[in-house]
């Protein structure tokens, strides 16, 4: 079984780096991208199982990035990360093909659970 | 190029400034607004009613007055004509009556019973014949050429044999060409008022005269019988003004004299005269047969009775119609205006509800924005504290040296600071400031702000600041700190818009009672779709937690509070220009003083 590969996309450096660090500590192969465009560039060269995508980012926002990702590599599961107090963006993301959404601030366990579920779903599909 | 200003925000931000114009409704004061609406509609109602009533009734009254005068004139004339016609017809009747009496007498000359030497019986027969023609005849007498009455029949037998040649009527009859003579009323030998008709006839070259006396009472009754018209009174006078008919009540008296002798030319006419208290209309006409004038009198009030009645009806109906129309106008207008007022009040209430709803929506939006902005640092804090926990867990084999932990803790501190900054700025925006108004020199404030920014914010880039300040710029009364904040926020944005090298141009001028502060940068510009959102709280294009999106929102609310606006011009790729308009004084001073209370 392959190692779980995760890409964290968030413009908040502190948050992104911390999550990357913690996931890596848990033997999850994790990378970070500071913006949507950055994420799409990384995706051209590398494959990931799950992408955690912040909704609100300057430039290309999470929803737009999600659409590009789904066009580029539809098999990757995407989890939307939303800081907004409404479900709106999370739900919109799910309509566009995201696997689930997680509200900020979220304990790491919740994020790990969701990443795990997403990975299981993707593995089920590929198997 | 797109222009945008902050005036559209004025409805959403709580305000103390809407009292400047009378037409602006302050949504905060429902009762005052409703009162204003009521007052407005009350005035409208009064104006409409007055206008309609005047506009309708005035022409109505003028028209009525015109017709009234025209009508009065016509009726006066017609009353005169009417009376004149009555007099004329009575005159004709009297003329005819007198002619008939003359003819009656003539007929006696032709009758077979007539002889120049009649017996008393023959005379009685002649008198009986005369009385058959008319019961006004009293007696009959025959006179020879000496004027002696040689034959007589009637109640005054003493007259037989009397010499009449000195009597005026006998003298007139013989000297005049006319074959007959009608006398005025006189007493004569019998000493009783009467008038006589005498005719002359020549037999064998001797002039014989036949004479009959007529009873004035009977003549009076005849005159009465031909009277026509309401309260119309007819009488006859001679040239001297003596009445020729007498009321039977004044028996045995010669009639009196009237003061009103009508002119002999023209032969008829109508005069208006006053008889005691009463105004009379008098028509006169001279008889053909005799030197008598017929006077027909009628009180003016009777003659013009129809007119007076018509006038009363006209006036009354005008008043009634006016009242009726006024009432209809009043109630119609009242109903219409009431309905309109009801609609306006309803509209006002809906508007207030809408304003309230939009405030609620704005609060909801603000709350969502706050949540998002606070959640980000919270997420960092949680994640970082998790990292520290991981470090302390040997299972993860992470670097857990004090230095590493300290580094993570400073990340937590930074995030907490960010959250604190957001709440502080929100407080600044929301709390009512205690104003400490001083005279501010905007130029000096700008210099100060630029100096401060150059030390920190402008250091990282090659930013050239060009000042174009007008020297004699009027001072304004304001709080310096909020103004500094406004300029600082705009200048920081200008600096952020510049990639690494650029120019910021600051210019001030005074025109149209305002101070214009224009800050222009050579940065990347603002996309048109963002232009209308840049003043919204939490709108930002700067990622990575560098901005809260509150800067321009705070600036806009401060400027609005001072009674000014912010205008924005921006060309994508060329730069943006923010113009802050601040009112010169009295206004700002007044506003702030009001706020002091």
Image (cartoon, rainbow, N blue to C red):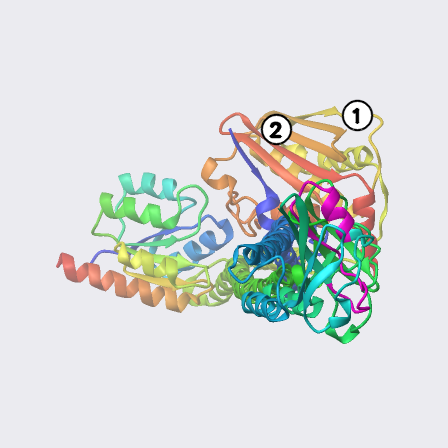
Nearest the camera: B144 or B395?
B144
For label 1, the crowd category at 10 Å Cα-Cα, with few meaning under 14, some 14 to 19 and many 20 or more, is few
Q: In the displayed structure, would residue A38 be above or below residue B341?
A: above
Which element type, helix, strand or loop, lies under badge 1? loop
Q: Chain of mark 1?
A: B
Q: In which quadrant will I find the C terminus of chain A?
A: bottom left
Q: Is residue B407 visible?
A: no
Q: Quadrant of residue A90?
A: bottom left
Q: Quadrant of residue A122?
A: bottom left
Q: Quadrant of residue B422?
A: bottom right
Farthest bottom residue in view: B249
- Residue B15 is inside the magenta segment: no
Q: Which residues are magenta?
A: B169-194
Nearest the camera: A100 or B32?
B32
Q: Residue at x 32, y 65 (%)?
A: A114
Q: Residue at x 79, y 37 (%)?
A: B445
Q: Chain of mark 2?
A: B
Identify residue for label 2: B521
Q: Position of residue B436 (x, y in %)?
A: 84, 53
The answer to which of marks 1 and 2 sits earlier in the sequence is 1
Identify residue for label 1: B470
């Amino acid at each position: 079984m392959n190692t779980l590969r995760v890409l964290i996309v968030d413009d908040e450096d502190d948050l992104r780096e911390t999550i990357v660090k913690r996931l890596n500590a848990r033997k999850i192969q994790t990378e970070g991208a500071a913006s949507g465009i950055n994420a799409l560039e990384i995706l051209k060269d590398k494959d990931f199982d799950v992408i955690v995508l912040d909704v609100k980012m300057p430039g290309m926002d999470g929803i737009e990035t999600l659409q590009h990702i789904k066009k580029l590599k539809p098999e990757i599961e995407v989890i939307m990360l939303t800081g907004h107090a409404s479900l709106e963006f999370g739900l919109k993301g799910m309509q566009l093909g995201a696997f689930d959404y997680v509200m900020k601030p979220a304990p790491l366990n919740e994020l790990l659970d969701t990443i795990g579920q997403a990975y299981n779903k993707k593995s089920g599909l590929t198997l | 190029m797109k222009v945008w200003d902050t005036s559209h925000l004025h409805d959403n931000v709580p305000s103390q400034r809407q009292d400047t114009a009378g037409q602006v409704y302050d949504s905060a004061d429902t009762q005052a607004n409703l009162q204003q609406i009521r007052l407005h509609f009350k005035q409208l109602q009064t104006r409409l009613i007055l206008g309609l009533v005047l506009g309708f009734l005035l022409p109505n009254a003028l028209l009525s007055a015109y017709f009234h005068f025209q009508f009065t004139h016509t009726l006066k004339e017609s009353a005169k004509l009417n009376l004149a016609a009555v007099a004329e017809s009575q005159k004709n009747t009297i003329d005819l009556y007198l002619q008939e009496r003359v003819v009656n007498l003539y007929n006696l000359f032709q009758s077979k019973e007539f002889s120049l030497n009649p017996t008393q019986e023959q005379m009685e027969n002649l008198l009986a014949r005369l009385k058959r023609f008319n019961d006004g005849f009293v007696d009959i007498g025959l006179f020879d050429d000496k004027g002696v009455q040689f034959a007589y029949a009637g109640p005054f037998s003493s007259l037989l044999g009397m010499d009449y040649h000195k009597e005026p009527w006998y003298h007139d009859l013989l000297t005049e060409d006319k074959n007959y003579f009608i006398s005025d009323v006189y007493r004569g030998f019998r000493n009783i008022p009467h008038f006589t008709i005498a005719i002359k006839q020549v037999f064998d070259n001797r002039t014989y005269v036949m004479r009959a006396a007529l009873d004035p009472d009977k003549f009076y009754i005849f005159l009465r019988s031909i009277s026509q018209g309401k309260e119309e009174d007819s009488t006859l006078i001679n040239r001297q003004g003596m009445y020729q008919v007498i009321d039977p009540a004044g028996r045995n008296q010669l009639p009196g004299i009237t003061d009103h002798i009508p002119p002999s030319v023209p032969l008829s006419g109508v005069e208006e005269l006053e008889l005691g208290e009463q105004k009379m209309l008098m028509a006169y006409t001279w008889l053909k047969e005799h030197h008598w004038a017929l006077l027909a009198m009628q009180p003016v009030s009777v003659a013009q009775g129809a007119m007076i009645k018509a006038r009363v009806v006209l006036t009354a109906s005008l008043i009634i119609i006016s009242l009726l129309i006024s009432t209809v106008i009043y109630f119609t207008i009242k109903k219409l205006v009431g309905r309109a007022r009801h609609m306006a009040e309803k509209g006002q209430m809906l508007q207030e509800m809408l304003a309230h709803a939009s405030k609620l929506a704005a609060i909801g939006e603000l709350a969502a924005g706050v949540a998002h902005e606070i959640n980000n640092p919270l997420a960092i804090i949680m994640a970082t504290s998790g990292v520290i926990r991981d470090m302390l867990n040997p299972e993860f084999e992470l670097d857990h040296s004090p230095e590493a932990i300290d580094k993570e803790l400073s990340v937590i501190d930074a995030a907490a600071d960010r959250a604190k900054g957001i709440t502080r700025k929100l407080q600044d925006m929301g709390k009512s400031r205690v104003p400490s108004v001083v005279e501010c020199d905007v130029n000096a404030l700008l210099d100060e702000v630029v100096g401060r920014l150059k030390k920190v914010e402008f250091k990282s880039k090659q930013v050239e600041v060009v000042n174009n300040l007008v020297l004699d710029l009027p001072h304004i009364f304001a709080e310096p700190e909020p103004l500094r904040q406004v300029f600082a926020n705009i200048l920081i944005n200008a600096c952020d818009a510049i990639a690494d090298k650029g120019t910021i141009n600051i210019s001030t001028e005074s025109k149209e009672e305002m101070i214009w502060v224009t800050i222009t940068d050579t940065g990347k510009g603002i996309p048109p779709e963002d232009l209308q959102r840049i003043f919204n709280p939490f709108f930002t294009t700067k990622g990575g937690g560098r901005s809260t999106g509150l800067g321009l929102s705070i600036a806009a609310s401060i400027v609005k509070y001072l009674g000014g606006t912010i205008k924005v011009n921006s060309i994508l790729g060329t730069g943006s220009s923010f113009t802050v308009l601040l009112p010169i004084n009295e206004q700002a001073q007044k506003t702030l003083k009001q706020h002091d209370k």
